[in-house]
Image (cartoon, rainbow, N blue to C red):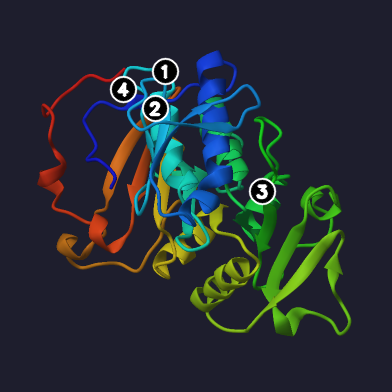
C-alpha cells in the first residue's frame, strides 16, 4: 500500500551519483526477478551481489536492502535517510508488477500553468534533466513504452534507454488516424522492435511494415476502444509493465478508459502562458465527482513529481492525507 504523502517531497538523484547508480542497479535486479518470486509462496530479503543480481538473505538480516512480500511485492529495507531509499521507494511499485498483476503507468511533464508544450508543439524540454533520466529509467523497467502521434511529430523520439543501464522496451506508436509518415527516427531504427498501431481500415492490402516498424491493425471505433485494444494486445504479447509516456491526448485516453494504475505528473518551474494542455477529461459539475487519488511527492532537480495511485481503493478524502504541518519548506 502506498503511504500517504507528506508535505515534504523526497529528492531523486540523477544517474551520475554513485548512490543513485547503486539504487538503480537494485531496482533493475528487483524488476527482473519479480515474476519468479511471485510464482513461489515465500517472502524474502535480499542484498545485491557483485554480479548485479539479488542475493537472498535470512529474514531480518541487517544487510538486506529490499524485501519481497507475497501479495504486496517489493519494499525498501534501507533506512529512510539512506540516499538509495527515495529511488527505491519510487520504482519498487513498478518493479513489483508481474504477468499475474500487471501495471500501466502514465506520465506527463507540465509547466506550472498546466501545459506540456507550446502551441507549435515544442516540448523539449519542459522538465529538467533529472526528469528526463526518470523517463529513461521507466522505459528500462517496463516491457513496452507507448507514445501518441503528436509526441512523435513534435519530438521525433527514439524511446530507448541510452541515458541509463537497462533493457530497451518494445516501442509502440499509437496513431489510430494514421497521421504519421515513415520519415521519423523511430521507424528507421531497427535496433529495437517497434509497433505502429493504426485503424485496420487504413492499412493497405499486404502492408505489414512502416519502415522497420510492424503495423498493428486496430478495430475502427472511438479512441477509448483503440487504447483498450492496444493494451490487450500488449498483455497477450507478454508485456506486464506498460509505460504510457505521452502526450496529453494519449495519456488522457488511457486515463478516461480507466486503464492507468498510476499517473505520474512532473511539474516544472516554467510558465508557458498558453499551449498544448496536459490531461483533458470530460467536465465534471461537482468537485466531489472529480478524481482525487492517493499520491506521493518526489523532487527531481527543480521539478516536482506527483506519483498518483489510481486503483479503486486509492481514492480518499483530501483532508485525510494531510498528516504533516500545513506549511513546510521543501526547497
Judge left or right: residue 203 versus residue 90: right
Q: Which residue is mark 4?
A: 80
Q: Which residue is mark 2?
A: 86
Q: Could you give the CA–CA distance between mark 2 and mark 1, rounded to whole angstroms?
A: 7 Å
Mark seen at residue 94: none
Identify the image quadrant of the C terminus: top left
Observer-nearest of 100 and 175: 100
Instruction: Point out residue 129 in the picture as x, y percentages from the top left corner.
Output: 56, 26
> Does dot 2 land on a helix, a strand or a loop?
helix
Q: Which residue is mark 3?
A: 154
Q: Could you give the CA–CA distance between mark 3 and mark 1, rounded to whole angstroms?
A: 36 Å
Q: Earlier in the sequence, mark 3 or mark 1?
A: 1
Instruction: Point out residue 187 in the picture as x, y percentages from the top left corner.
Output: 81, 55
Q: Quadrant of residue 204?
A: bottom right
Q: Could you give the CA–CA distance between mark 3 and mark 2, rounded to whole angstroms?
A: 32 Å
Q: Could you give the CA–CA distance between mark 4 and mark 1, rounded to whole angstroms?
A: 8 Å
Observer-nearest of 46 and 73: 46
Amino acid at each position: 500500500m502506498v503511504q500517504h504523502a507528506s508535505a515534504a517531497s523526497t529528492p531523486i538523484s540523477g544517474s551520475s551519483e554513485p548512490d543513485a547508480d547503486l539504487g538503480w542497479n537494485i531496482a533493475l535486479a528487483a524488476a527482473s526477478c519479480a515474476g519468479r518470486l511471485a510464482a513461489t509462496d515465500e517472502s524474502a530479503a535480499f542484498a545485491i551481489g557483485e554480479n548485479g543480481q539479488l542475493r537472498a538473505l535470512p529474514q531480518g538480516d541487517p544487510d538486506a536492502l529490499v524485501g519481497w512480500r507475497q501479495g504486496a511485492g517489493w519494499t525498501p529495507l534501507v533506512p529512510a535517510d539512506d540516499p538509495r531509499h527515495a529511488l527505491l521507494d519510487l520504482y519498487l511499485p513498478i518493479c513489483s508488477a508481474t504477468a499475474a498483476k500487471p501495471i500501466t503507468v502514465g506520465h506527463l511533464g507540465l509547466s506550472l500553468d498546466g501545459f506540456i508544450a507550446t502551441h507549435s508543439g515544442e516540448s523539449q524540454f519542459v522538465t529538467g534533466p533529472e526528469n528526463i533520466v526518470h523517463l529513461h529509467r521507466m522505459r528500462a523497467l517496463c516491457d513496452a513504452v507507448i507514445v501518441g502521434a503528436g509526441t512523435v511529430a513534435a519530438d521525433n523520439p527514439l524511446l530507448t534507454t541510452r541515458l541509463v543501464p537497462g533493457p530497451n522496451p518494445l516501442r509502440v506508436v499509437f496513431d489510430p488516424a494514421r497521421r504519421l509518415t515513415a520519415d521519423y527516427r523511430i521507424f528507421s531504427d531497427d535496433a529495437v522492435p517497434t509497433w505502429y498501431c493504426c485503424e485496420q481500415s487504413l492499412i493497405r492490402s499486404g502492408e505489414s511494415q512502416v519502415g522497420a516498424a510492424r503495423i498493428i491493425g486496430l478495430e475502427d471505433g472511438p479512441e477509448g476502444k483503440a487504447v483498450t485494444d492496444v493494451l490487450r494486445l500488449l498483455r497477450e504479447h507478454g508485456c506486464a509493465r506498460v509505460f504510457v509516456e505521452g502526450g496529453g491526448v494519449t495519456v488522457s485516453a488511457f486515463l478516461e478508459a480507466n486503464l492507468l494504475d498510476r499517473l505520474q505528473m512532473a511539474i516544472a518551474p516554467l510558465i508557458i502562458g498558453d499551449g498544448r494542455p496536459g490531461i483533458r477529461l470530460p467536465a465534471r459539475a461537482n468537485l466531489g465527482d472529480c478524481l482525487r487519488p492517493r499520491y506521493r511527492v518526489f523532487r527531481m532537480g527543480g521539478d516536482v513529481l506527483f506519483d498518483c495511485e489510481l486503483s479503486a481503493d486509492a481514492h480518499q478524502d483530501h483532508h485525510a492525507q494531510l498528516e504533516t504541518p500545513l506549511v513546510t519548506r521543501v526547497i
